[in-house]
Amino acid sequence: MKSVVSFLIHKRGALLALSLIVTVLLGLGIPRAGFDTSLGVLLTKSDPYLQERDQMAQTFPAPVEISFAIVPASGIVFERETLLALADLNREFRSIPLAFSMNSILEWQSPFGDQSLFPRTVTQQTQFTEQELLDAKQRVVDDPFLNNSYIAPGFDLTLASVRLRQTSISSQESKEIVQASAALIQSLQQRHPSVSFYVSSEAHYEQSNRDAMISDLSFLLPLVLLLCTAIICLSFRSIALGCCILGVALVTVLMTIGALTWAGQSFNTISVMAPLVVVTIAVADSVHIISIFRQSLLQGLSPVAAMSQSLKFNLRPISLATITTFIGFASLNLASSPAISSFGTVVAIGVAFAYLLTLGVLPALVLLLPEARLGSREASGGVAIINASIRGAQGLVAKHGRALLVLVASLATVSLGLSFLNDTDFDRASFISEDSPLHDYYSVVSERMDRGTPLSYGIEVANPYGTIEPDFLRRLDEFTTWIGEQDQVIGVASLVEVVKTVNQGMNENDARYYSIPDTLAEVEDALFNYSVAQASDFTLDTLANEDFSLVRVFVSTSTQSNQGILELSAKINEEFTRQLPAAKLLHGSSTLLFARMDKAVTVELLQGYAFSLIMITLTLIIGMRSVYYGLLSMLPNLLPAVLVFGAWGLLVGRIDPFVMMLFSISIGLVVDDTVHVLSTYQSSRHEGLMPTAAINRALEKAGPALIITTAVLALGTCVLIGASTLYFQQAATLLVPIVVLALLLDLTFFPALLMLFDRKPLAPSAAE
């Protein structure tokens, strides 16, 4: 240890120069930083349904669609002003790049060729009779393809769907589409002020995510840096020391982002939070060095001697804290969701850079300062408050240690039980900025329409044309009828309904012929007739592949929760195996993938948490050279998350996998406090001090830095409340109480625990 400290002190100039060179080289890649805003980055790559979904998407490529919601101020769609606004949209939608068709109630084409709800084209001169509007409304009620699909049941909202020529679009095309859509809506809004227009598409979703990412990084990251610096400047009464720590944190972030970019990685909706976490970790490491450095200065040491003393004191705990924090975040790579694993990777890289820069750069920066700028040697108001807090903790442990242990143990037991009240669920809207127009679209549509949850399946047989064999169609009819009878199902659509409807039409609309024909030739005739009269939005190739070896089944459900979707899908799988054992069921719905992701990622995160807990425990056992201390230190690291998630289960009860990720990483964040308290305590015990004296010394030496770093971490995390998305706001709501509780437990519960179980005197050890 002495040789390492000597190297850091004597080579500090060279280390500073080397760090600046590396920073510049890595920083050159920052302008090339990319943003992956697709939903696919959230999905678990290990799910076999993902390949099935991709196979279905490749077989049935769907054009990109843009959905417009039109909401009249009067609350009545079937009035002249609303219909004129919709007509203008229908005439002008081609101003959007790549747009080629639009479907709405004005130009409605049913699957069987009925052209329109209205007898004539809507223009400024068009006048509708009251009876014509009543007839149109009745047709909407009777048509399952329109009711609650293109128009709300209360007739106070209608949708228009614009299709593009392509099945996928580039980032540049996406940007152009969003801009053109906004310009079109602005133009329509000016001409029809009594009608509100909202828009949604995958392009808008990705653009919204990208804008939110850039906004959060460009606004929140500097805010966190400045807030952390202000806290440190006030705590140490030195602007110069605050700037030194700010410099280390800034260089850490630049190196982390630069390394990520040079590695060819992109930020996503989760990993964009990583730089904010890296900043607080870098500041925490630096504060421990500065705190002991300042204490040594107050004892009369020179700046160089004080820095040497600080490095000797902090080298082991900072090294252990870095390793354990690295393990905590790196364990997220056990999750199969790329968004979660990349977040863990970015923070783990940042933790490593923070460690190297804290030891290699911070001493050089601090020792470049004149001694007069190292802060006042008199206790400031902030220092006095910190010292008073530490004395209060010492008194509480001495007088009420056992009662404190009983209280915390009781709360932990109750919280553990309450934590099981949390249900995992994923809501993609939580990643949409509340300031985004897309958020407004989801709000108005969800208020007025219950569109259910769509599921899509594929049924594949071995032989070409096997799916249009009359016997197979009858068994498929029985299967889809069974699906439609389930309580959660609103409707089912497949090739069966087409064949039966056309067969009835070919037989003078006799209801007795609404059935599957007896021969393959009759089925082929029905499909040929349908292909002649089919609407452009309901073509035959959207229902079956070219050789009719694969057909699609569309299921609309009333189920909103992921658990309900999984239960329904499991029942469908079981019934399919019973009724169609020779066929293969393909799961082609992203909705089902996201529901399965909840369960898979939760299990993976719990496995990662168990792995990191074991590895962190082993690290502390080795680092402390004591199985006893290593195991004992785990309690204050586990309790904060247990207490917070128990309260969350009681008050909220719903978490998504990406919030569950916070539970997994919490141990990596809070272990830092425990390591510093335990390291100082153990050293004091080896010097021959009894537990009470060793605890008092540990709190006096490590306590000030712990309070400052917790304030930095808590206030830095609070900044996330101002983030653009609900996800980051929830992250702040959970992380802040976790880190604050960790500090309180390390200042009170952990010392009381040590006093109760560590009563044996220790022989002094050899100086390390």
Image (tube, helix red, strand yellow):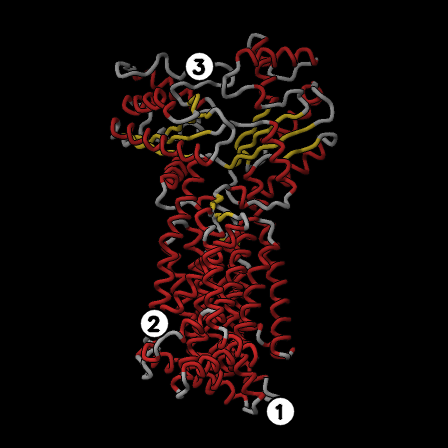
Where is 220 relative to 628, above or below?
above
Hey, what amino acid is under mark 2?
Ala
The residue nearer to you, when weighing 29 against 529, is 29
Tell me where residue 686 appears, x and y as whole percent.
58, 88
Please report the residue visible at 60 percent of the width from the left and 35 percent of the height from the top.
53
Q: CA separation, marks 1 and 2?
A: 42 Å
Question: Where is the C terminus found, in terms of image quarters?
Answer: bottom right
Q: CA separation, marks 3 and 1?
A: 94 Å
**Disc assigned to residue 115:** 3
Where is 435 relative to 722, above or below?
above
Is label 3 or label 1 in front? 1
Where is 530 relative to 482, above or below?
above
Residue position for label 1: 763
Please report the residue visible at 43 percent of the width from the left and 66 percent of the height from the top.
248
Q: CA separation, marks 3 and 2?
A: 75 Å
Label located before the other in sequence (3 or 2): 3
Hey, what amino acid is under mark 3?
Gln
Residue position for label 2: 240
Q: Is residue 408 visible?
A: no
Q: Is residue 716 visible?
A: yes
Hey, what amino acid is under mark 1?
Ala
Label located before the other in sequence (1 or 2): 2
